Amino acid sequence: MSAAEEILDVVDEHDRVVGRLPRGEVYARGLRHRCVFVLVRDAGDRVFVHRRTATKLVFPSLYDMFVGGVVGAGEGYDEAALREAEEELGVRGLPRPTPLLKFLYEDAAGRGSWWSAVYEVRCDLPVDPQVEEVAWHGFLPERELLARLGTWEWVPDGLAAYERLRAHRAGTLIM
């Protein structure tokens, strides 16, 4: 099955399931769905950063400080976070990612909105990212990641999730 054929839950503004459709149709119609964002740190507390492949359906060739993706139909956020992290990192046996926050992302480019659950996990395993998903990757110290925010082109939803996570950790609220 292609990524566009994957079945997703369509949800309302309160994150309640109101239907199920193929991902391609959900994207084409800008329907609200669910996504997970997993911040991955290595043993040295560096953050996994990658550049998405040019073939990605959404935000091709942009940088991201999260691994993750859509939550499948009938799948919970926690299960999707672990599945997506292991798939994208090319590992098995990760600890269960820790949930940190959840927000409704509204895409400024008109692609719709999606409920976004943000997680964190430590990965001490050697990574072997999916070549279909990841064109480049590295573990960066957080200060280097912060320095790159203004110079690299980042996926907008990942950037929004990262800003919310930083505000959450600082004890401030972003609406």
Image (cartoon, rainbow, N blue to C red):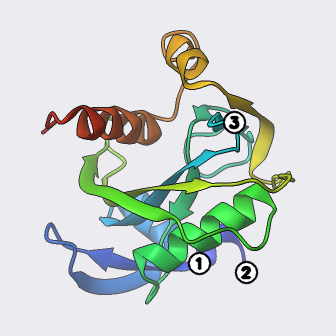
28 shown above or below 46: below
Where is residue 106? Give x, y as percent.
26, 46
Contact flag, marks 3 and 2 (Cβ < 8 Å): no
Q: Secondary structure at mark 1?
A: loop
Label 2, label 1: how far apart the Cα atoms are: 7 Å
The numbered mark, 2 or 1, whose residue comes first in the sequence reads 2
Residue 4 x %, y %? 61, 69
Residue 64: quadrant of the picture: top right
- Which residue is tagged 1? 6
Helix, strand or loop for disc 2: loop
Amino acid, disc 2: Met
Q: Nearer the viewer, residue 160 or 78?
A: 78
Element under label 3? loop
Circle 2 residue: 1
For the residue pair 68 and 53, the one nearer the viewer reads as 68
Q: In the picture provided, is 60 more to the left or to the right than 17?
A: right
Q: Nearer the viewer, residue 22 or 50?
A: 50
Task: Determine which residue is flagged by label 3.
Answer: 44
